[in-house]
């Protein structure tokens, strides 16, 4: 990926994190949503946004559905204005379970240390 696409992906991630927390949709529990990563196409025409929730994968999946159906246009317009992009990329929200997996991994490590008596 090019330097410009990488930089734009990080800018989009930063701005979307702020914009999602400001949404007033009652179906979203925005305090527990996290933008894990963003992947921008080389021509900056589309962007995959990976969303995770501390409440689990089901909540992340529901949040992605709400964001795709109700807030995609608003978020795209705001991104274009804030990042001064000629054409804002098409956003595609994808649920991500990496937070859930990392919590499970840390729990297993903690249990193993507890079993050995080091904790």
Image (spheres, rainbow, N blue to C red):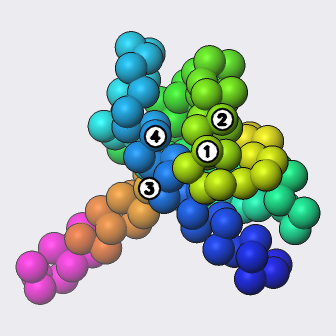
Q: Earlier in the sequence, mark 3 or mark 2?
A: 2
Question: Does the magenta segment cover residue 113?
Answer: yes
Asked which secondary structure carries label 2, the reply is: helix
* Badge 1 vs badge 3, beta-carbon distance below 8 Å: no
Q: Position of residue 47 (x, y in %)?
A: 75, 52
Which range is magenta?
111-119
Measured in 3D between alpha carbons, the distance from the residue under mark 1 to the one under mark 3, in whole angstroms, is 31 Å
Q: Nearer the viewer, mark 1 or mark 4?
A: 1
Q: Earlier in the sequence, mark 1 or mark 4?
A: 4
Nearest the eye: 114 or 28 = 28
Can you say whether 15 is above or below 9 in the image? above
Question: Does the magenta segment cover residue 25?
Answer: no
Can I make out residue 53 in this image? no
Q: Earlier in the sequence, mark 4 or mark 3?
A: 4
- Residue ID for mark 1: 81
Query: In the visual, does 58 lie left or right of 87?
Result: left
Asked which secondary structure carries label 1, the reply is: helix
- Residue ID for mark 3: 99
Quarter of the image with the C terminus in it:
bottom left
Can you say whether 105 is above or below 61 in the image? below
Instruction: Determine crowd level at label 3: few under 14, some 14-19, many 20+ residues with C-alpha closer than 10 A.
Output: some
Q: Position of residue 80 (x, y in %)?
A: 67, 46
Instruction: Determine crowd level at label 1: few under 14, some 14-19, many 20+ residues with C-alpha closer than 10 A.
Output: few
Asked which secondary structure carries label 4, the reply is: helix
- Residue ID for mark 4: 19
Q: Nearer the viewer, mark 2 or mark 1?
A: 1
Instruction: Determine crowd level at label 2: few under 14, some 14-19, many 20+ residues with C-alpha closer than 10 A.
Output: some
Q: Position of residue 1 (x, y in %)?
A: 82, 78
- Residue ID for mark 2: 77
Asked which secondary structure carries label 3, the reply is: helix
């Amino acid at each position: 990926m090019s330097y410009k696409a990488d930089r734009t992906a990080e800018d989009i991630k930063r701005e979307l994190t702020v914009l999602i927390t400001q949404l007033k949709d009652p179906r979203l529990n925005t305090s527990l949503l996290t933008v894990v990563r963003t992947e921008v196409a080389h021509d900056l025409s589309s962007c995959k946004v990976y969303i995770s929730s501390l409440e689990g994968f089901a909540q992340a999946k529901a949040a992605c559905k709400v964001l795709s159906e109700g807030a995609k246009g608003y978020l795209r317009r705001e991104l274009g204005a804030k990042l001064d992009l000629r054409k804002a990329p098409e956003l595609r929200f994808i649920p991500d379970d990496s937070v859930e997996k990392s919590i499970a991994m840390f729990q297993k490590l903690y249990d193993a240390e507890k079993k050995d008596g080091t904790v």
